[in-house]
Image: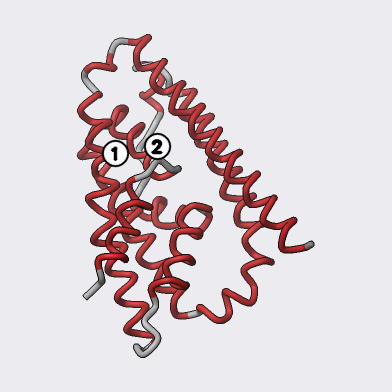
């Protein structure tokens, strides 16, 4: 069974603002909760699978993390900037006609280039792996914990977007909301990229 410290860690890391939650709130507003569910489930499953892989290959990842984290961060943040541009373009009820919510598979794959997901899961593998337990037990415990505990945390953001949906169907309100969310996502991407660059420089010093 996961301990209270692990559960608290997952809740705090999962429910605080980040790329996944900003996109879920925006999807909830633009597409509703039902159409956002594949995106939401994909995030939880993607984090679970990524956590499983990180914990299983923990020693190798620790050896190569300095080499792979900056390229992953650049790719992931570039993708976030592109998503923020797409959100900006979908800034009116008319603009939504060509927009689609993220798929389950797309949301799962996004976790592999999401800097916050890597930070959250690598830290969890370091902090919460039980020394006397097998690698398989550790990997399964952390993976299942992130999948199940993380679900209600990210669900809150999709539900919040869905509840705002009717209020924001007036053209200028929806444009304003999508503009704010697009800007927030872009700022998040640039902040994450800057933070990764500083870490890269520190590791190279």
Image height of 196 relative to 59, above or below: above
Residue situated furthest right in the rendering: 205
Q: Which residue is drawn at 23% across and 31% down?
A: 162
Q: Which residue is drawn at 62% across and 48% down?
A: 195
Q: Earlier in the sequence, mark 2 or mark 1?
A: 2
Disc number placed over residue 97 in the picture, else none: none
2 and 1 marks in contact (CB < 8 Å): yes
Q: Is mark 2 on a helix, strand or loop?
A: helix
Q: What element carries label 1?
A: helix
Give the quadrant of residue 94. Answer: top left
Q: In this view, does 133 lie above or below 78?
A: below
Counting other residues with Cα less than 10 Å from the Cα at mark 2, is it few (<14), some (14-19), or many (20 or more)?
A: many
Q: Quadrant of the N terminus?
A: bottom left
Residue at 23%, 16% (x, y): give it: 167
Q: In which quarter of the image is residue 51?
A: bottom left
Percent position of residue 21, x then y:
37, 41
Depth check: 105 or 174 in front?
174
Spatial distance from mark 2 to mark 1, Cα to Cα?
8 Å
Residue 22: which numbered mark, if any? 2
> Relative to 198, does residue 156 appear above or below in the rendering?
above
Quarter of the image for the C terminus: give it. bottom right
Decide: few, some or many residues near mark 1? Use Cα within 10 Å; few <14, some 14-19, many ≥20.
many
Expressed as whole percent of the image width and height from the top left, the position of residue 136 reads: 36, 85
Describe residue 196's horizontal placement relative to residue 177 as left or right.
right
Q: Position of residue 107 (x, y in %)?
A: 39, 51
Q: In this view, does 59 lie to the left or right of 20?
A: right
Q: Residue placed at 35% from the left, 65% from the top?
A: 48
Residue 2 position within the rendered picture, expressed as x and y whole percent measured from the top left = 25, 72
| Label drawn at residue 157 | 1
């Amino acid at each position: 069974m996961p301990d209270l410290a692990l559960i608290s860690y997952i809740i705090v890391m999962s429910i605080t603002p980040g790329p996944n939650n900003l996109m879920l709130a925006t999807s909830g507003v633009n597409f509703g909760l039902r159409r956002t569910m594949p995106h939401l489930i994909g995030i939880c499953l993607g984090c679970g699978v990524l956590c499983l892989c990180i914990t299983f290959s923990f020693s190798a990842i620790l050896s190569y993390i300095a080499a792979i984290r900056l390229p992953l961060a650049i790719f992931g943040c570039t993708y976030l900037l592109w998503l923020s541009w797409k959100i900006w373009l979908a800034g009116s009820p008319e603009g939504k006609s060509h927009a689609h919510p993220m798929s389950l598979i797309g949301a799962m794959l996004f976790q592999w280039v999401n800097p916050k997901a890597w930070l959250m899961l690598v830290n969890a593998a370091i902090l919460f792996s039980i020394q006397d337990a097998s690698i398989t037990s550790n990997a399964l415990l952390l993976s299942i914990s992130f999948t199940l505990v993380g679900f209600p945390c990210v669900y809150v953001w999709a539900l919040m977007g869905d509840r705002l949906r009717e209020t924001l169907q007036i053209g200028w309100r929806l444009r304003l909301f999508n503009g704010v969310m697009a800007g927030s996502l872009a700022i998040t991407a640039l902040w994450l990229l800057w933070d990764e660059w500083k870490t890269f420089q520190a590791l190279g010093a």
